[in-house]
């Protein structure tokens, strides 16, 4: 994919915030070249803007929040992963509350919203971040890495010693030049133990959580009647989160991501560290003659999707 993209038309949806339980309307608007992804709080006078940038991340407890001038929007990661998967570079996101709606707990409803709006190719070239040198972040026993790779590959491993988690894969590795995010990852939902939900709600978090927007797990079973969407849905949701967090860099990465027990905090630290270490990466664009690598990203994000 060589050119920047926006959406073709304005599109809206309504949902609830998973943490606040508030009703939220979100509207996606086309944006000019080089705008990037910008959020607008249209419930506040003067409609303040917040740029979707890694440096604007202000809170990573159970979600990724971004802030500018003391105005915050939380839970942006699923929407950001949807923008990444559809190759959206420029869009204005109007929202009438402090939290992006959780929808069904995955990126799939946002991808449907983008498809409904349509995708518009723009005149300016798209820039990618090519990883030149390996970068590794450690936080306790959690790690997150970016490595050079021709394309984009991501892997994740989590270590939860629990009756239910132990029955399902805890590791996933996907080369997105060969595997569709939309088909194989986007429907993976957020998840958690019911006893952890009680703890979170005591901290005024997850107040809108339900079986309609999360996979709930008791001591021995998955509570949701329909079970999992993928056998490895748990670990794939972690990949979905990481991709959304990393897209706050403002550009798609050409490289490989590896996560081990990492979460929003580690993902954001990795993004910020990469930005600061300019010798570890470079901006690149594709022209018509640079086909092999460009085609790997066209497979990921076809214009006709």
Image (cartoon, grey):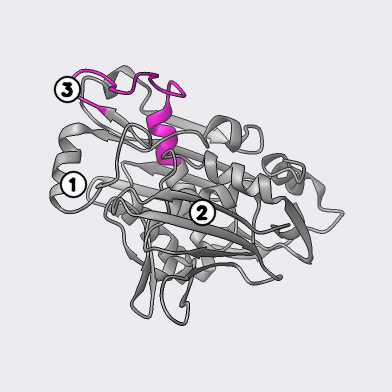
Task: From this view, report whether residue 160 is shown above or below residue 43.
Answer: above
The residue lying toward the viewer, choosing from 121 and 147, is 121
Which residue lies at the image location 41% right of the left edge and 46% below the top edge? 102
Quarter assignment of residue 32: bottom right
**18 to the left or right of 82:** left
Mark 2 or mark 1, earlier in chain: 2
Q: CA distance from mark 1 to mark 3?
A: 17 Å
Within 10 Å of disc 1 (Cα), the crowding (few <14, some 14-19, many 20+) is some
Residue 62 location, x and y as percent? Answer: 29, 50
Q: CA distance from mark 2 to mark 1?
A: 24 Å
Residue indicated by mark 2: 80
Within 10 Å of disc 3 (Cα), the crowding (few <14, some 14-19, many 20+) is few
Mark 2 or mark 3, earlier in chain: 2
Task: From this view, report whether residue 193 is shown above or below residue 21.
Answer: above
Within 10 Å of disc 2 (Cα), the crowding (few <14, some 14-19, many 20+) is many
Quarter placement of the C terminus: top right
Q: SS of the residue at dot 1? A: helix
Mark 1 or mark 3, earlier in chain: 1
Res. 219 mark: 3
Residue 138 location, x and y as percent? Answer: 30, 53
Which residue lies at the image location 67% right of the left edge and 46% below the top edge? 116
Q: Which residues are magenta?
A: 217-239
The residue lying toward the viewer, choosing from 187 and 244, is 187
Which residue lies at the image location 78% right of the left edge and 57% below the top edge? 121
**244 to the left or right of 144:** right
Residue 262 location, x and y as percent? Answer: 33, 46
Identify the main secondary structure in magenta.
loop
Q: How many marks?
A: 3
Residue 16 location, x and y as percent? Answer: 38, 49
Q: SS of the residue at dot 3? A: loop
Residue indicated by mark 1: 200
Quarter assignment of residue 76: bottom left
């Amino acid at each position: 994919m060589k050119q920047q993209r926006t959406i073709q038309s304005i599109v809206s949806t309504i949902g609830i915030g998973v943490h606040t339980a508030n009703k939220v309307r979100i509207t996606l608007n086309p944006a000019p070249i080089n705008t990037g992804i910008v959020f607008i709080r249209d419930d506040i006078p003067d409609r303040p803007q917040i740029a979707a940038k890694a440096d604007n991340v202000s809170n990573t407890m159970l979600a990724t929040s971004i802030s500018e001038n003391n105005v915050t929007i939380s839970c942006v990661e699923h929407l950001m992963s949807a923008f990444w998967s559809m190759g959206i570079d420029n869009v204005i996101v109007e929202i009438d509350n402090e939290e992006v709606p959780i929808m069904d707990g995955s990126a799939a409803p946002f991808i449907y919203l983008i498809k409904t709006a349509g995708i518009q190719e723009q005149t300016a070239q798209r820039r990618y971040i090519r990883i030149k040198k390996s970068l590794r972040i450690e936080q306790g026993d959690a790690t997150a890495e970016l490595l050079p790779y021709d394309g984009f590959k991501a892997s994740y491993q989590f270590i939860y010693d629990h009756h239910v988690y132990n029955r399902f894969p805890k590791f996933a590795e996907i080369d997105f030049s060969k595997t569709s995010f939309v088909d194989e990852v986007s429907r993976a939902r957020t998840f958690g133990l019911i006893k952890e939900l009680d703890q979170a709600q005591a901290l005024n978090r997850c107040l809108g959580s339900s079986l309609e927007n999360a996979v709930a797990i008791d001591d021995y079973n998955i509570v949701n009647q329909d079970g999992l969407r993928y056998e490895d849905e748990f670990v794939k949701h972690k990949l979905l989160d990481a991709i959304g967090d990393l897209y706050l860099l403002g550009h798609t990465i050409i490289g490989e991501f590896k996560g081990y027990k990492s979460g929003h905090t580690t993902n954001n630290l990795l993004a910020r560290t990469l930005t600061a270490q300019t010798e570890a990466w470079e901006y690149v664009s594709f022209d018509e003659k640079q086909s092999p690598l460009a085609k790997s990203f066209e497979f990921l994000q076809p214009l006709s999707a």
